[in-house]
Amino acid sequence: MALSTMNSAKGLEFDHVIILGLSNTNMQHLDDENDDKLQQLKRLLAMAISRARESVVIGYKESEKSDLVNYFTNGTFDEVNL
């Protein structure tokens, strides 16, 4: 078991990846699709998700969720509301 940031997970692999607090506060960027920060955050999130061998859990409050969630492809995940 390991605890790390998304940045420090580069090059590593884990059976399970859990990303908590995927909120606009934690993943701030401009609304412009060409914003370098947005592109960087999309790549970082994709890299963090790809570290998982078996499963990925992404947690966020519905009222605070990052708009990066909108880039997930429908049908590739199961959404669970708690």
Image: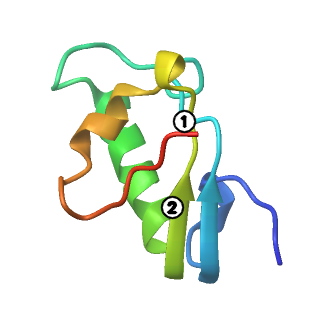
**Residue 48: which numbered mark, if any?**
2
Q: Secondary structure at mark 1?
A: loop
Indicate the quadrant containing the N terminus: top left, top right, bottom left or bottom right: bottom right
Q: Residue at x 63, y 60 (%)?
A: 18
Q: Residue at x 58, y 39 (%)?
A: 82
Q: Secondary structure at mark 2?
A: helix
Q: Is residue 10 above or below residue 72?
A: below
Contact, mark 1 vs mark 2 (Cβ under 8 Å): no
Left or right of 76 on screen, residue 33: left
Q: Which three-letter amino acid code belongs to the residue tagged 2?
A: Ala
Judging by the rendered image, the residue that carries numbered circle 1 is 22
**Closer-to-camera residue (46/7):** 46
The earlier-in-sequence mark between 1 and 2 is: 1
Where is residue 78 shown, x and y percent of the image? 36, 59
**Residue 55: which numbered mark, if any?**
none
Q: Residue at x 49, y 40 (%)?
A: 81
Q: Is residue 49 above or below residue 42?
A: below
Q: Which three-letter amino acid code belongs to the residue tagged 1?
A: Leu
Q: Is residue 74 above or below residue 35?
A: below
Q: Residue at x 46, y 64 (%)?
A: 49
Disc 1: CA contacts within 10 A as few (<14), some (14-19) or many (>=20): many
Q: CA distance from mark 1 to mark 2?
A: 12 Å
Q: Is residue 24 visible?
A: no
